[in-house]
């Protein structure tokens, strides 16, 4: 066993699916899962046939905006669904997307001109909340000192698959990037389309 000192590894196991398959070791305690830096989670499917591995911390209140201004606290939304690969083999595709609430960038020159020195108030402006200027004489709205928030980005990862069932197709809808393995021999290019 390697000594894991500076990292934490989290293993997600997707349970169920069309074959209702669960790894035989799901409920056993193997030695490799006993390390303090390795955590294991079993994920059951959602009603729509997808799995949600991680959810993002959406900013919904001013206190959320104060706490979650840094990208490391924002998280990503990671979802999975089955894809068709070969019979009797359960395979998954994954979609990773940013939270719907995207942070904005504060234009420091504009903020200073309106009486807001660099301070924790920038966190609230980034999250879309108005703040009072430093001398408390005027409320400054985010649109006055920030750029437009970027649209959340979405990336879909599909392995070599013959078909994409509806749940996976819905997860992939409006993806900014699709990463897909689709290799075939140059000597027989029609073989891939025949499958």
Image: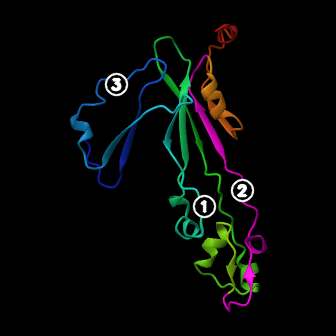
Question: Residue 34: where, in percent of width, then height?
Answer: 23, 42
Q: Residue at x 29, y 54 (%)?
A: 5
| On screen, residue 67 above or below 192 | below
Q: Residue at x 71, y 56 (%)?
A: 150
Disc 3 secondary structure class: loop
Q: Are marks 3 and 2 in contact (CB under 8 Å)?
A: no
Disc 1 from disc 2: Cα separation: 17 Å
Disc 3 from disc 2: Cα separation: 40 Å
Residue at image mark 2: 150
Question: Residue 190: where, in percent of width, then height?
Answer: 70, 8
Residue at image mark 1: 60
What number is the disc on residue 23? 3
Q: Residue at x 42, y 20 (%)?
A: 20
Nearest to N terminus: mark 1 or mark 2: 1
Nearest to N terminus: mark 3 or mark 2: 3
Write down the region rendered in magenta: 134-162
> Which of pointers 1 and 3 indicates the residue nearer the eye?
1
Q: Is residue 26 left or right of residue 184?
A: left
Question: Residue 36: where, in percent of width, then height?
Answer: 26, 49
Q: Are marks 1 and 3 in contact (CB under 8 Å)?
A: no
Disc 2 secondary structure class: loop
Question: Residue 105: where, in percent of width, then height?
Answer: 69, 67
Q: Quadrant of residue 156?
A: top right
Q: Quadrant of residue 43?
A: top left
Disc 1 secondary structure class: loop
The local crowd at label 3, few if under 14, some if 14 to 19, many if 20 or more residues have their Cα within 10 Å, is few
Q: Is residue 31 left or right of residue 191?
A: left
Q: Is residue 46 magenta?
A: no
The local crowd at label 1, few if under 14, some if 14 to 19, many if 20 or more residues have their Cα within 10 Å, is few
Q: Is residue 118 left or right of residue 12?
A: right
- The front one of 109 and 133 is 133
- The front one of 24 and 183 is 24
């Amino acid at each position: 066993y390697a000594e894991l000192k500076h990292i934490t590894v989290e293993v997600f196991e997707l349970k169920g699916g069309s074959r209702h398959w669960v790894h035989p070791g799901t409920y056993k305690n193997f030695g490799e899962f006993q390390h303090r830096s390795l955590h294991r989670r079993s994920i059951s499917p959602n009603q729509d046939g997808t799995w949600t591995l991680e959810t993002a911390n959406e900013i919904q209140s001013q206190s959320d905006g104060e706490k979650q201004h840094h990208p490391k606290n924002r998280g990503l939304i990671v979802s999975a669904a089955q894809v068709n690969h070969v019979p009797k083999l359960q395979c998954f595709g994954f979609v990773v997307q940013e939270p719907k609430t995207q942070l904005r960038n504060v234009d420091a020159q504009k903020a200073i001109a309106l009486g807001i020195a660099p301070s924790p108030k920038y966190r609230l402006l980034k999250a879309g909340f108005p703040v009072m200027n430093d001398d408390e004489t005027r409320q400054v709205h985010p649109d006055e000192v920030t750029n437009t928030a970027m649209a959340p980005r979405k990336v879909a990862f599909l392995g070599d698959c013959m078909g994409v069932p509806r749940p996976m197709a819905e997860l992939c809808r409006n993806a900014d990037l699709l990463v897909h393995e689709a290799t075939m021999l140059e000597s027989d290019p029609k073989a891939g389309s025949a499958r």
